[in-house]
Amino acid sequence: MITALDHIAIAVPDLDAAIKRFMEDFGLTYEGTEIVEAAKTTTAFFPLPPTSIELVHPLNGEGPIAGYLEKRGGGIHHLCFRTDNIEEDVERLRAKGYQFIGDKPTPGAHGSTVIFIHPKSCGGVLIELSQPADAH
């Protein structure tokens, strides 16, 4: 079951400048960066309870975020919903006709398990489902 808005992800062409902006200009608490090899991204999180802002930047200039930035520039990339049972939610949403990017959930930041719903299924919005590590 979907339990919360986990985070709003923003694709950024310059991760250091974006981190500085959110820390210094907006005064948000910086939680650090993490490399997510499966997504070919470097992420930076700014908790803003009960949700977070996640900055996503291409790892080594590769991956889907690199293509997104090249095509669209920086901006809001996706909304992420937290789930307590990703397998059940994927099954339920597939039965309703939602298309997913990938066949099954993959590793995400902070030890989570994630899968994305194709924007064609959600009126043009990329949606991520994320099950936290402690909910496995």
Image (cartoon, rainbow, N blue to C red):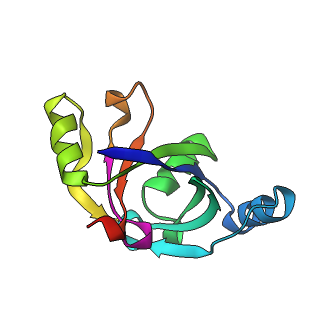
Determine the residue positioned at 19% across, 52% down.
Answer: 87
- Image coordinates of residue 101 in percent, x first then y, are 28, 46
- Image coordinates of residue 18 in percent, x first then y, are 73, 60
Q: Is residue 110 magenta?
A: yes
Residue 53 picture quarter? bottom right
Q: Looking at this view, is 17 or 81 the one in front?
A: 81
Determine the residue positioned at 46% across, 64% down.
Answer: 62
Number of numbered discs on residues: 0
Q: Looking at this view, is 71 or 127 the one in front?
A: 127
| Quarter placement of the C terminus | bottom left
Q: Which residues are magenta?
A: 108-116
Q: Looking at this view, is 18 or 133 the one in front?
A: 133
Q: Looking at this view, is 77 or 51 the one in front?
A: 51
- Image coordinates of residue 99 in percent, x first then y, are 24, 36
Eyeballing the image, is 16 above or below 63? below
Determine the residue positioned at 15% across, 42% down.
Answer: 91
Q: Is residue 69 left or right of residue 35?
A: right
Determine the residue positioned at 58% across, 52% down.
Answer: 11
Eyeballing the image, is 57 above or below 128? below
Q: Is residue 87 magenta?
A: no
Q: Residue furthest right?
A: 25
Residue 39 picture quarter? bottom left
| Quarter placement of the N terminus | top left
Q: Is residue 100 left or right of residue 44?
A: left
- Image coordinates of residue 3 in percent, x first then y, are 39, 46
Q: Is residue 86 left or right of residue 10?
A: left
Q: Is residue 11 left or right of residue 97?
A: right
